[in-house]
Image (cartoon, grey):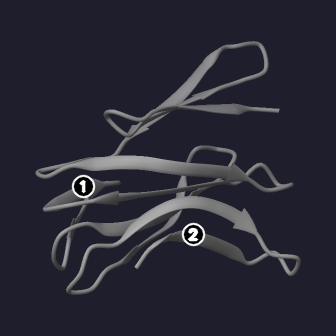
Amino acid sequence: MNKYLLFFLFCFIVHVSNGQQYLSSNQITGTGGAEVESFISDEAQNTYISGYFSGQLVHNNQLETAVKGNDIFLTKYTDDQEESWFVTIGGVGTEQSSRLAFADDGNILIAGVY
């Protein structure tokens, strides 16, 4: 089983194997603040990461802009460290995620401030 290490200050994701061998890494950066708040993995070893950002955020060479204040991001990485999808949740207020969980039907639940 592969493992993911998250460095919360820089939103830097490091992918290592069971033998602690470096496999790959990704970075989520931005012009404002960006912070990872929670991550979980499913049975297929996909990893879901949530956090929040302000200003602009760059992931997988894509630029996202917060609507106002902090906006939430949620992303899915496959076991091969490929980004499957990335979504933002934002409005005119401040949004922050705090925790992720799986519902009984497999959907992702996001707790936070909306």
Tell me the kind of residue under disc 1: Val
Q: SS of the residue at dot 2?
A: strand
Q: In the rendered image, which quarter contains the C terminus?
A: bottom left
Q: In the rendered image, which quarter contains the N terminus?
A: top right
Return the x and y of residue 98 as percentages of the image width and height: 51, 58
**Residue beneath the point at 32% across and 54% down:** 59
**Residue beneath the point at 31% across and 80% down:** 90
Tell me the kind of residue under disc 2: Ala
Cα–Cα gap, marks 2 and 1: 23 Å
Check disc 2: other Cα within 10 Å, few if <14, some if 14-19, many if 20+.
some
Residue indicated by mark 1: 58
Q: Is residue 103 above or below residue 39?
A: below
Return the x and y of residue 46 as percentages of the image width and height: 70, 54
Check disc 1: other Cα within 10 Å, few if <14, some if 14-19, many if 20+.
some
Residue indicated by mark 2: 111
Q: Quadrant of residue 72?
A: bottom left
